[in-house]
Amino acid sequence: MERKDPNKPNNIENEDTLTTRQGHPVTNNQNIRTVGNRGPATLENYDFIEKISHFDREKVPERIVHARGAGAHGYFETYGTAGDEPVSKYTRAKVFQDKGKQTPVFIRFSTVVHGNHSPETVRDPRGFAVKFYTEDGNWDLVGNNLKIFFIRDAMKFPDMIHAFRPDPVTNIQDSERFFDFCANSPESFHMVTFVYSPWGIPANYRMMQGSGVNTYKWVNEEGEAVLVKYHWEPKQGIKNLTQQEANEIQATNFNHATQDLYDAIERGDYPEWELFVQIMSDDDHPELDFDPLDDTKLWPEDKFPWLPVGKMVLNKNPENYFTEVEQAAFGTGVLVDGLDFSDDKMLQGRTFSYSDTQRYRVGANYLQVPINAAKKRVATNQEGGQLRQQNDKPPGQNPHVNYEPSVLGGLKEAEQTGKEYTPEVKGELVRESIERNNNTKQAGETFRRFKDWEKDDLITNLVNDISVCDQRIQDKMIALAEEADEEYGRRLREGIEEAKKMMMDETSKNPLGNKDSENAPEQAIEKGHDADPY
């Protein structure tokens, strides 16, 4: 099949072309995306959601998750290939074409559960969000350091975060709440295995992996799609910490990861990551024992090899933390032409939630904040809203026309030249889990891949927290471990039984994996030095 020159434009864009606030040309401003032309609508209508959500806020807070963060500027350099093949075989996205082309990026690393001034040694996934300022507008690749997640359906996300965050009465993190949720959400067991191992405490931000976590799609010039997973591999190597090592670092510095990133860039030791993708044909793959859209699963590398597509270099620190790192806003729905959504239920839910959170947190005009603004022309009909910076109308456009369509000098749709990707969708609308759950198999495989010291730390951390939980929670967690791997289950069961024999008045109200913290209030009194009032 003859392929179009990847250097030719996919959409014809002129000075009067309508775009989204991300700078994406709008090729259809009349219809939302639906299953068939009668509906129902889908949640992935990013252009519509951006448009209507801003409209809802035209008349005139710390992040809920990922509050603690550090960031840096840099660039992404494409290889122009996916493995040994031209990348244009799989995607027409310009950011990946032309070997050696560099695209500016801004990255924000973060912890997930705790607040803005929490220590960077906590047991927690780490956010890994990259904003690409591409020639077609912004692209946000929003993920974590770990390649999987606790849940596979966005409906459960608020409950998950509520369970992991501090108790609403005591305001203290409680491991019993954590394991109560996980024990009753068996799909979480694979992620629990990672988070309670040393992989749950990366040594710093420079020496950790990154992942898109969700399954996306790539679309080529012919409108053909493949499923894709993204993986960032640090060229600095990977380092993780045991709980004891993390405690020792936290005793002297609770900003150590932010400091490490800042200092490395200041001394010219620029961190680098190579970007790999895994590619899978766009179908449900009945030959696999899991669903490829399940975020709790890894795609086996022997069946779906990692293909290098480019590298990222961070070479500039922020000039102001608040205006850049704190106000940086990311969303999984922020894609450019040649990138698309899969039916991944976590991705579908995150696509609305992430951008809507930024409109609440930073404001309806968060995309006019310089760190979030596209580095290309932007032209919209959006009006008003909190902290509006400027008019999106380009010079020469009729300022009286803030709608489309119009013959009076208003903005117009872009002409699309790349073939539209039109996946066929049919079936009953249901509220059901995917069929191939297989909740524990990969957790067992991950456990068997761990080195002995990683297994030891995992079991120790799990025993410390689960042993003080309700017996029903203990039984469910042990059953999941036994189902995953015989050694895993046996060691967890024996460890919990032994811990319970020695238990006095221990409580579950501790930071995750940190057994002795319940003694800290009493120790502070015992070790405190008397002082006279002044």
Image (cartoon, rainbow, N blue to C red):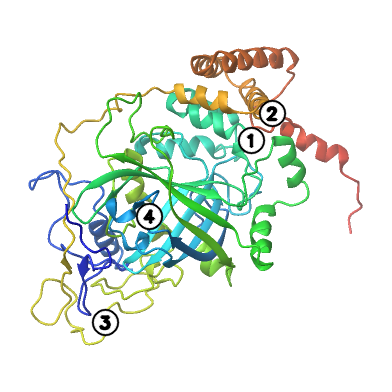
Q: Which residue is mark 3?
A: 394
The disc labelled 3 sits on which kind of residue? Pro
The residues tagged by marks 4 and 3 sit, at their Cα atoms, a distance apart of: 36 Å
Dot 1 alpha-carbon crowd within 10 angstroms: few under 14, some 14 to 19, many 20 or more: many
From what the image shows, is residue 298 above or below residue 439?
A: below
Dot 3 falls on a residue whose secondary structure is loop
- Between 270 and 150, the one lying in front of the other is 270
The residues tagged by marks 3 and 2 sit, at their Cα atoms, a distance apart of: 60 Å
Q: Which residue is mark 1?
A: 198
- Residue 368: image x %, image y %? 39, 71
Mark earlier in primary sequence (1, 3):
1
Identify the residue at horizontal 52%, vertical 67% (top origin): 324
Identify the residue at horizontal 91%, vertical 46% (top origin): 530
Identify the residue at horizontal 18%, vertical 60% (top origin): 418
Of badges 4 and 1, nearer the viewer stands 4
The disc labelled 4 sits on which kind of residue? Thr
* Circle on res. 453: 2
- Residue 360: image x %, image y %? 40, 58
- Residue 186, located in which quarter of the rendered image? top left
The residues tagged by marks 2 and 1 sit, at their Cα atoms, a distance apart of: 9 Å
- Residue 452: image x %, image y %? 67, 25
- Residue 403, located in which quarter of the rendered image? bottom left
Q: Which residue is mark 4?
A: 81
From what the image shows, is residue 72 above or below residue 513?
A: below
The disc labelled 2 sits on which kind of residue? Trp
Mark earlier in primary sequence (2, 1):
1
Mark earlier in primary sequence (3, 2):
3
